Amino acid sequence: MKQCAFLTLQETGDFVIDDVHAIEPLRDLGWNVSVLPWQQTARDWSEFAAVIIRSTWDYFTDVDAFMGVLQRIDEQSTLANPLELVRWNLAKTYLRDLEQQGIGIVPTLWTDELQPDSLPACFDQLDVDELVIKPVIGANGEDTFRLQRHEAAAQAAPLVPLFRQRPLMVQRFMPSILDEGEYSLFFFSGRFSHAILKVPAGDEFRSQEERGAAISPVQPEARLLQRATEALACVQPTPLYARIDLVRDAAGDFVLMELELIEPSLYLRTDPAAPAHFARAVDDWLQR
């Protein structure tokens, strides 16, 4: 049996992790899978033919340590996704790169730290009465806030220390995320596998399952699949796995929320064929 590893959390807590669904299909293809926390600083990674980043959802609490581990893995084994893609995808400024290549994204402003007195201009520039702010490096919707124009100064004041000398993004709040939800499309080795719709809980705007969002499988309409495919085509080399999150804009088109290449939940349990799709992609990708 060939040996590979899935990197995961040290403490899984309340997270919903479905990587286990891929283990048996990989075994059928000749792969034995070890599930290991990423904080394996003394591990000899050369014992694995491949190490696949999976549910490392606490990485943003110590980015330097995380990247150090990935660097060692890259030197000793085959890392997926590749280290160059992880570095590019680590900061959400990759969205700016995609926008420059013609990909429609949620309208976004970029700033080095939160300044409450600059928020009125942000509302004006984005032409909205509601904004979302989030860190440039982050995950799981942590430190992500929705601000309203009429009380933005009061809402932002307690957040200033949180974003002191911490780059953030200021985005137009997209009402469709409440009315319709956020779509996630999954691609393995560049091929579409499956899709889900994530609808935030009644008191939330964030679409993470751990925050109460309702998750359901969907068949993406043609324009949605087209927009996801266009975004992925801008990424080189082609990643082993990608999750592309999109929302509908006011004109009825779809714009990119995120293109996740590091540790996206793949929601393998939502489609009977998805685990086998992923396993075959892993096997083919590593043999190439």
Image: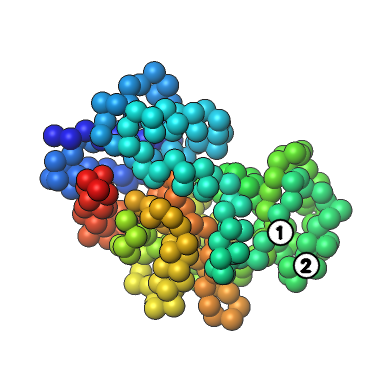
> Around disc 2, counting alpha carbons within 10 Å, would you say few (fewer than 14), some (14 to 19), or many (20 or more)?
few
Q: Going by the picture, which residue comes out furthest to the top? A: 42
From the top left corner, tell me how far across and down residue 129 is, in percent: 75, 68
Residue 109's tag is: 1
Identified by mark 2, the residue type is Gln
| Residue occupying image coordinates x 29% and y 26% | 46
Identified by mark 1, the residue type is Leu
Picture layout, residue 249 above or below residue 172? below
Mark 2, residue position: 125
From the top left corner, tell me how far across and down residue 282 is, in percent: 26, 48
Visible residue check, residue 15 = no
At numbered mark 1, what does the secondary structure look like: helix, strand or loop? strand
75, 212: nearer the viewer: 75
Picture layout, residue 52 above or below residue 151? above
| Residue occupying image coordinates x 52% and y 58% | 258
> Around disc 1, counting alpha carbons within 10 Å, would you say few (fewer than 14), some (14 to 19), or many (20 or more)?
some
- Is 161 on the left or on the right of 69, as rendered? right
